[in-house]
């Protein structure tokens, strides 16, 4: 009888620990937890798999909350020694439908509509520049 109780307690404690681990891993914040409405319009990356991976995104937003733009950028994939750039545009203004890795990354007529540029460089340094002058 004592073995049954000890076995039951071990199983119960194990189930509680597994349940807590599952809850913590499935309840992590993500892009959906942000207040701003983000919509990814375009994405490109280089085909080079033996060097730094370069990624560029065009994303539209409904409001300009810089802390949320930075959080969104931090959620984007990033490779060690690679570079990730996210170009943010107002969803009600004209924005490019595609993005390139080489300059000009998109047509110059969209420069004035670019609200901010998020960049995470090869060393993991993050910058968020508000304005299209960051792209020049």
Image (cartoon, rainbow, N blue to C red):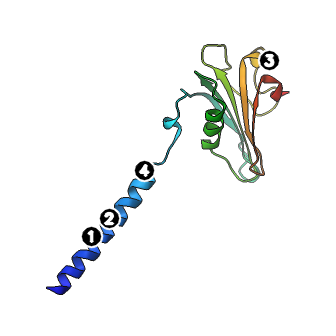
Q: Would you name the residue on which mark 4 appears?
A: 26
In the rendered image, residue 122, in percent from the top left (x then y), is placed at 77, 49
Question: Relative to residue 102, is residue 49 drawn left or right?
Answer: left
**Nearer-N-terminus badge (1/4):** 1
**Residue at screen point 81% across, 26% down:** 104
Which of discs 2 and 4 lies nearer the camera? The answer is 2
Mark-to-mark CA distance, 1 and 4? 21 Å
Q: Would you name the residue on which mark 1 appears?
A: 12
Above or below residue 10? Residue 123 is above
Q: Secondary structure at mark 4?
A: helix
Q: Residues within 10 Å of mark 1 (few under 14, many from 20)?
A: few
Q: Secondary structure at mark 1?
A: helix
Q: Secondary structure at mark 2?
A: helix
Q: Would you name the residue on which mark 3 appears?
A: 108
Mark-to-mark CA distance, 4 and 3? 42 Å
**Residue at screen point 19% across, 80% down:** 5
In the rendered image, residue 118, in percent from the top left (x then y), is placed at 72, 35
Q: Would you name the residue on which mark 2 appears?
A: 16
Which of discs 2 and 3 lies nearer the camera? The answer is 2
């Amino acid at each position: 009888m004592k073995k049954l109780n000890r076995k039951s307690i071990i199983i119960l404690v194990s189930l509680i620990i597994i349940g807590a681990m599952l809850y913590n891993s499935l309840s992590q914040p993500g892009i959906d937890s942000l207040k701003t409405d983000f919509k990814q319009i375009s994405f490109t990356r280089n085909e080079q798999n033996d060097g730094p991976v370069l990624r560029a995104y065009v994303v539209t937003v409904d409001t300009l909350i810089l802390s949320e733009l930075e959080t969104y950028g931090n959620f984007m994939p990033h490779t060690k020694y690679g570079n990730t750039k996210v170009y943010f545009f107002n969803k009600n203004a004209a924005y490019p439908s595609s993005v390139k890795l080489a300059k000009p990354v998109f047509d110059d007529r969209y420069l004035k509509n670019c609200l901010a540029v998020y960049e995470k460089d090869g060393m993991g340094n993050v910058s968020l520049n508000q304005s299209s002058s960051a792209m020049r």
